[in-house]
Image: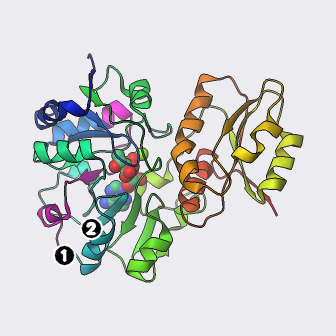
Amino acid sequence: METRYLTSEDVRTAADLLRRGGLVGIPTETVYGLGANGLDPEAVKRIFEAKGRPQDNPLILHVPSADWLERYCRDVPPEAYALTDRFWPGPLTLILPRREMVPDVVTAGLDTVGMRCPDHPVTRAILEAAEVPVAAPSGNTSGRPSPTTAEHMREDMDGKIEAIVDGGPCRVGVESTIVDLTVSPPRLLRPGGVTLEELEEVLGEVAVDSAVRRLMRDGERPRAPGMKYRHYAPKAPVTVLTGDPEKGAAYLAEHAGPRDGIICFHEYCARLTGGERVVLDLGPAEDKGEQARRVFDALRSFDHTRVPAIWAQCPDAAGLGLAVANRLNKAAGFHIVELI
Ligand code: TXA
Ligand code: MG
């Protein structure tokens, strides 16, 4: 199949392709998504094929506004609207009880569905023109880092899908925060662009699913099925360094091999460069927004190199740090060296 490359001018074309059962790479503020008409089971099945995604991993539905929630969800609690008022459009996905009309292939047979209203002008225009909810996982091949540019989408999906819309680099860079509103207290299933602290301001107590901070044990099932898979992983093994960044840099200077890959805070790049090392800048140690924007591109770039091992400095868990750390830890299979 020849993939078409569309621009922000081609909203109508993208919407028509979606309506007719096509797969379209769409830009969002978090990461690029691989979209299909969420009411068309045949189109949705093709998402799983294009990504090589396990069938038991449900998709989220993208809608142009909170007014669409009742169409696909029942028993929508007031907390849902408190959250959409504050954070939609934006990087927050709500898990709610689904209505029968949502195809089983979208929810992987669960009786809940994830709902999200993305904050990207092009994709919102596409959603409005398509007049259908768009099922969209991140647009990477399953297991690879999520795409944050149209070029990343091309790397993974060229020739497999009808079109990719270039909406520029993603502003947030890590996927949406997922909060399950079908349990009490509400539960954070995946940290993302909306922070845990911000959720707590609206909801009060929020439980944090154990899959966010550690590896699932054999037989254990996270509430977001996708959190159990090895994820975001470059081909070389990754080790994460947490704790004091100065000590982390000193540890790397001593332990990283002459051909290893290093993702480090901006402050330490010069100090750690040397030999044939590939050193990538994650952004300033105090700028977690920049780290979120860069983390997937950094993990992805190592697949164009032959580094035998990768080391990554990791921020603390406050604010966006929880999401950045979760992505790095998952890429590392939670192989962590703590320096305190
Ligand atoms: O920012 C995002 O959320 C991006 C953009 C494209 O919108 N999408 C995205 O989708 O990250 P995906 O499929 O890569 O990740 C969705 C996660 C998966 O871990 C999946 O298991 C979980 O959400 N999920 C989906 N529906 C669920 C449900 N009903 N209950 C629990 N977890 C669910
Ligand atoms: Mg994904």
**Mark 1 residue element:** loop
> Can you tell me which quadrant of the image ligand 2 is in?
top left
User: What crowding class fits label 2: few (fewer than 14 Cα within 10 Å), some (14-19), or many (20 or more)?
Assistant: many
Q: CA distance from mark 2 to mark 1?
A: 8 Å
Q: Residue at x 70, y 44 (%)?
A: 266
In the displayed structure, would residue 289 be above or below residue 282?
below
Q: In the image shown, does 288 or 242 lie closer to the viewer?
A: 288
Q: In the image shown, does 194 or 24 lie closer to the viewer?
A: 194
Q: Residue at x 11, y 37 (%)?
A: 19
**Mark 2 residue element:** strand
Magenta stretch: give its range. 48-75
Q: Residue furthest top?
A: 2
Measuring from the top left, give residue 334's x and y in whole percent. Answer: 65, 53
Measuring from the top left, give residue 5's x and y in whole percent. Answer: 28, 23
Q: Residue at x 83, y 33 (%)?
A: 257
Task: Say which residue label 1 marks.
Answer: 75
Residue type highlighted by circle 2: Leu
Residue 197 is labelled as: none
Residue type highlighted by circle 1: Asp
Discs 2, 1 touching: Cβ within 8 Å: yes
Q: Earlier in the sequence, mark 2 or mark 1?
A: 1
Task: Say which residue label 2 marks.
Answer: 96
Q: In the image shown, does 307 or 90 lie closer to the viewer?
A: 90
Q: Residue at x 36, y 69 (%)?
A: 180
The answer to which quarter of the image holds residue 319 is bottom right
Whether residue 56 is visible to the viewer of this picture, yes or no, is no
